[in-house]
Amino acid sequence: MEMTIHASFLPHTDPEATLTFYRDVLGFEVRNNVKYGDLAWITVGPPGQPDTSLVLQPVAAFPGITDDERRMITEMMAKGTYAALNLATKDVDATFNRLQASDVEVVQEPTDQPYGLRDCSFRDPAGNLIRIQQAS
């Protein structure tokens, strides 16, 4: 059986800041931007990879959760402990320098990890951890 990853989901708390981060800072293409009242679902993806998307959805839109659970998710997002995204690049140091210059929140500068990867990490505007690994 052959499968590909079509879409993954990350929560967001501010559609404008989220759009700016993923489009202008990371350089992703905007594939869809659906608004419903004050809520926005923003679908982005890496250029040249039209079959892979990331859907950024509002925390308020999670079905079946209570207000207390929604608050807890928002608090965990702000600390960077709720959701994460791993990306890869050919030159993690150059990518780090470009992202750091855009005034994003740096979590970890480029580091050689004991498990064989070189990576760095940032937080998106909602607090989600974005780890960028050196592609081999």
Image: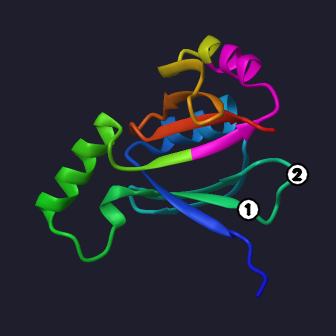
Query: Residue at the bottom extreme?
Result: 1
Quarter holding the N terminus is bottom right
Of residues 15 and 99, the one nearer the viewer is 99
Quarter holding the C terminus is top right
Number of labelled discs?
2
In the image, residue 126 sits, relative to residue 102, either above or below, namely: below
Residue 72 in picture, x, y percent from top left: 18, 51
Which of the numbered marks, if any, corresponds to residue 52? 1
Q: Residues within 10 Å of mark 1 (few under 14, many from 20)?
A: some
- Picture quadrant where residue 100 is located: top right
Of residues 18 and 106, the one nearer the viewer is 106
Q: Is residue 87 magenta?
A: yes
Per the image, label 2 sits on a secondary structure element best described as loop
Which of the numbered marks, if any, corresponds to residue 48? 2
Query: Residue at the right extreme?
Result: 48
In the image, residue 111 sits, relative to residue 78, either above or below, namely: above
x 62%, y 40%: residue: 22
Which of the numbered marks, if any, corresponds to residue 11? none
Residue 77 in picture, x, y percent from top left: 32, 43
Q: Amino acid at mark 2?
A: Gly
- Picture quadrant where residue 128 is located: top left
x 35%, y 38%: residue: 80
Which residues fall within the magenta stretch?
86-99
Q: Is residue 43 magenta?
A: no
Residue 111 in picture, x, y percent from top left: 59, 20
In the image, residue 69 sits, relative to residue 126, either above or below, namely: below
